[in-house]
Amino acid sequence: MPSVTHDDAPLLADLMPWSVAPPRTGRGWPTAPDAASLGARWDALLGAEGPDREALFGSTRSRTPRSAVPQLPGQSTGTGRLSRESGPCPEPVRVLHGPFDEQWLIPDHRLIDAARPELWRVADGRQVFVVEQTVVPGAPGPVLLATSLLPFGAGRGGRIRPLYRRPGGLEPNLAPGLTSHLATRLGRLPDALDVLAWTVAVARPGPHGRAVPLTADPEVWERGVELGRAMLRLTRRDGERPKLPGGRRPYVRAPLPASPLELRYDPDEETLFLGEGRISPVPPHVWDFEVGGVRVLEQWFTERTGAGEPGTLEAIGPASWPQSRTSELLELLTVLALLGELRRRQVELTVREVPIGTDELRAAGVLPVPEAARRPASVLDHHEEGPEGQFALL
């Protein structure tokens, strides 16, 4: 078959057709970098009554303490009105709050303006969520991030595309017939994770959305899948802790202060400063790592040092910098360092040999995808509790 240009590369929106808008809390206090702060905030909320509780809650058109809403799928939180709540704080869950920023969330539907229950229904140990990132012309950084955690970034980022439409890794969220067509062209049948790995490795901004060039060359495909799987191991953070070779691992060279107020970087010394605290070696590409035009390390630091307004629930947090936070930072530095090295391989990966364009996929019947593939699958095989303890109608 003749080769085609990258302008004809299929769109991510067609290859992974089912997508969901990002969840939106509507208020900042139900998420925090540490779980203990969430328990303290919950206790402060329930310790207030009447108008004081409503003021602390932060009412919106979607949620007030008097809202009646069903449970989040997979959670066992209360469904009575929050104005009457007196129980303990629901067990926080780990979420992806922003690029490379893992935080905690109180998984209570009464606190969340737009929780996107369809995402919660398919979230399990096998799921992978692909999050579209803001594309800034000329800015470096990935256009997609993959995570095993539920993406919950208060509305930041683009649409979310689960790899599987059903729990248990069932029914891949791929254009029907895509893997069969790739098998015909490549001589082997790729699985859903292969397609995701390739996508993460080669996706790029296009004039009509995020484009995913496809190759029919088995050798190029294998290189891209291998690279993508290495990237997934780092961004999913669900395997062994990443490590750098000895001599390149970042260490705390001077203790971090109890309340670091400033983050800066010295490229000559390859040192990251948090107040008077020092961590090195930190390669320049780690400090410069951006997503959506925003430096990852600066955003991560701001999320952990920006004090909330006094008298609000967001102001409740640890009195000093926790030791666990330093460990998280060292791991983040390691992840960004390893990803930076993989990004160099991305530049070297070219998709020239007989790329598979949209015209070919249309001729094969893969495109256009049926409308049903763009809608969530029916996965309600169990009762979900509705408002005020009633069972939801299925």
Image (cartoon, rainbow, N blue to C red):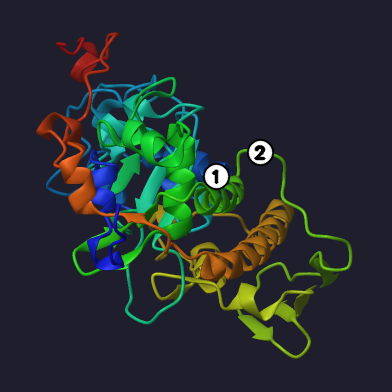
- Residue 150 in picture, x, y percent from top left: 42, 40
For this orientation, the residue located farthest to the front is 1
Quadrant in which the C terminus appears = top left
At 61% across and 39% down in the image, what residue appears?
A: 238
Above or below, 15 against 388 in this view is: below
At 13% across and 33% down in the image, what residue appears?
A: 370
Image position of 109 (left or right of 314)? left
* Closer to us: 38 or 232: 232
Q: Which mark is residue 236?
A: 1
- The secondary structure type at the circle numbered 1 is helix
* Closer to us: 226 or 316: 226
Image position of 91 (left or right of 66)? right
User: Mark 2 sits on what residue?
Assistant: 239
What's the CA distance linking mark 1 and mark 2? Answer: 8 Å
- Residue 352 in picture, x, y percent from top left: 42, 64
For this orientation, the residue located farthest to the right is 246
* Closer to us: 323 or 114: 114
Amino acid tagged 2 = Gly
Q: Label 2: how many residues lie within 10 Å, few (<14), some (14-19) or many (20+)? A: few
Image position of 360 (left or right of 355)? left
Q: Label 1: how many residues lie within 10 Å, few (<14), some (14-19) or many (20+)? A: some
Amino acid tagged 1 = Arg
* Closer to us: 334 or 70: 334
Above or below, 283 against 330 in this view is: below
Above or below, 167 against 43 in this view is: above
Pointers 1 and 2 in contact (C-beta within 8 Å): yes
At 52% across and 54% down in the image, what residue appears?
A: 220
Above or below, 101 against 67 in this view is: below
- The secondary structure type at the circle numbered 2 is loop
Location of residue 264 by image quarter? bottom right
- Residue 35 in picture, x, y percent from top left: 55, 42
- Residue 231 in picture, x, y percent from top left: 57, 52
